[in-house]
Image (tube, grey):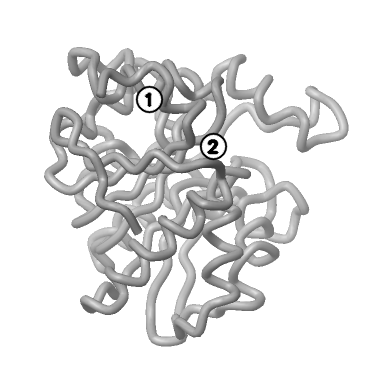
Amino acid sequence: MDKPQEINGFQVFVVEDEHEGGKVAFELVQAAYAQGAQVFGLATGSTPETLYEELKASNLDFSDRISVNLDEYVGLSGDHPQSYRYFMEEKLFNEKPFKQNFVPNGLADEETEIQRYNQVLQDYPIDLQILGIGTNAHIAFNEPGTSFEAKTHKVKLTEATIEANKRFFDSEEDVPRYAYSMGIASILEADQIILLAYGPKKAQAIRDMIHADKTEQIPATALQDHANVTVVVDQAAAEKLAV
């Protein structure tokens, strides 16, 4: 694995495509594992899938480790094919079991679930957090305007996010309008963060995350305050970076 470039405090790997990105991310996860990481924060969506393929093919044993997921749709049960728990089971957990997996409960009472998940994060501090990024620079479901002080909260999804996610549902009307999400403050508490992004649609968000002034209108700029963020991007996602 080549050395990353340091850009405004971020360690940046520019790779050929998402398959090479998955391999680079795997090496970073493997290194954290070897150094004793116990709690892994996980993300859903297409971006981390090549990493999860690498994890499944590896000999790493997570049966004594903990996973904590970023988010879940409100209104979907864990066995719904479009729920994030179902996604994680299909893409990783069924073949690479952990000692315990935490995913928000999309059917739970709001106040109860927020309190429960904040307690999970307190009980199991995250050693390594995997992140993606939205075209509007959201991280998890923390949309523009979300307070950097937010812990776990219920989020009203923007039309842009609904539009981006409708391809996974039979119709746009089926896309949930709300989600439970780990807050930005919770994400920043992770010891180490690996953010993955591929494709030209992510180029502006990556540029803004690294180079824009810190603002709640660009949620990912909160990561500028974190001391250990590694970014893995393909050439298309990196095309607007000043390197």
215, 109: nearer the viewer: 215
Q: Residue visible at 65% across and 66% down?
A: 89
Residue 30, picture quadrant: bottom left
The spot of residue 67 in percent (x, y) is: 42, 67
Q: Amino acid at mark 1?
A: Ile
Q: Residues within 10 Å of mark 1 (few under 14, many from 20)?
A: many
The spot of residue 79 in percent (x, y) is: 73, 60
For label 2, the residue is: 179
* Residue closest to the far right: 170
Left or right of residue 188: residue 66: right
Q: Amino acid at mark 2?
A: Ala
Q: Residue visible at 58% across and 51% down?
A: 19
Q: Quadrant of the C terminus?
A: top left
Gap in angstroms between the C-alphas marked 2 and 1: 24 Å
Left or right of residue 38: residue 60: right
Left or right of residue 218: residue 46: right
For label 1, the residue is: 206
Q: Residue visible at 26% across and 73% down?
A: 37
The spot of residue 212 in percent (x, y) is: 24, 14
Q: Is residue 52 above or below residue 183?
A: below
Q: Quadrant of the N terminus?
A: bottom left
Q: Residues within 10 Å of mark 2 (few under 14, many from 20)?
A: many
Task: Verify CB contact (< 8 Å) between mark 2 and mark 1.
Answer: no
Label tally: 2
Q: Mark 2, mark 1: which one is toward the viewer?
A: 1
Between discs 2 and 1, the one toward the N terminus: 2
Residue 53, picture quadrant: bottom right
Q: Is residue 58 above or below residue 150?
A: below
135, 57: nearer the viewer: 57
Tell me the element at label 1: helix
* Residue closest to the far front: 2
Point out which mark residue 97 bears. none
